[in-house]
Image (tube, rainbow, N blue to C red):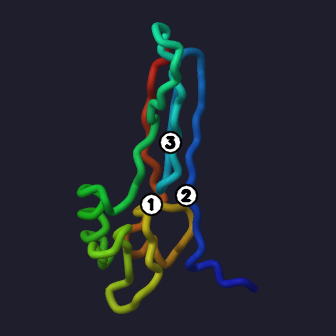
Amino acid sequence: AVDTSESGTTAVSLLVLGSTLYCSNVGDSRCILGRRDARTGRVAPAPLSVDQTCYRVDERQRVQRMGGRLDEEGDPPRIWLADAFRPGCSFSRSLGDKVAEDIGCIATPEARLRRRT
């Protein structure tokens, strides 16, 4: 058997219902909408998700409350067990990764909705 206790992934999903876009993400996977400017014809990016990493103050604080040790000197900042240099996650949410979940790298997605215009 393969030990998957330190294996996980990030994910993003988008559901389009009529003129409403529902986006959810876990970790640093991104959803970006391309919007064409009617006047210039140029396409510009419009982010639909926000990365969940320890660059964000709210995510750093949540991880620390849950017992994660942060290495804020590194780039990117990483999450470690209090007494070991593992798992070293660079994102603050993921699917799977049981070891990291115990120190704040949770699987709860953030969700946003946006109306198409």
Q: Which residue is mark 1?
A: 93
Mark 1: few, some, or many residues within 10 Å (few <14, many ≥20)?
A: many
State if disc 1 and disc 2 touch (CB < 8 Å): yes
* Disc 2, SS: loop
Q: How many marks?
A: 3
Amino acid tagged 1: Arg
Marks 3/1: CA–CA distance: 12 Å
The percent position of residue 117, horizontal first and vertical second, equals: 47, 12
Decide which of tag 2 and tag 1 comes sooner along the chain. Answer: 2
Residue reaching furthest top?
Answer: 39
Marks 2/1: CA–CA distance: 7 Å
> Relative to residue 12, is residue 44 drawn left or right?
left
Query: Compared with residue 114, is residue 57 higher up or lower down, i.e. above or below?
Result: below
Q: Which residue is mark 3?
A: 24
Q: Nearer the viewer, residue 55 or 21?
A: 55
Amino acid tagged 3: Ser
Q: Note whether residue 114 is visible.
A: yes
Mark 2: few, some, or many residues within 10 Å (few <14, many ≥20)?
A: some
Residue 54 falls in which quadrant of the image? bottom left
Query: Compared with residue 28, is residue 99 higher up or lower down, i.e. above or below?
Result: below
Residue 57 falls in which quadrant of the image? bottom left
Query: Compared with residue 64, is residue 47 higher up or lower down, i.e. above or below?
Result: above
Residue occupying the point 66% across, 84% down: 3
Residue occupying the point 56% across, 78% down: 6
Residue occupying the point 58% across, 79% down: 5
Residue occupying the point 38% across, 73% down: 78
Residue reaching furthest right?
Answer: 1
* Disc 1, SS: loop
* Disc 3, SS: strand
The percent position of residue 11, horizontal first and vertical second, equals: 57, 52
Q: Which residue is mark 2?
A: 10
Q: Note whether residue 67 is visible.
A: no
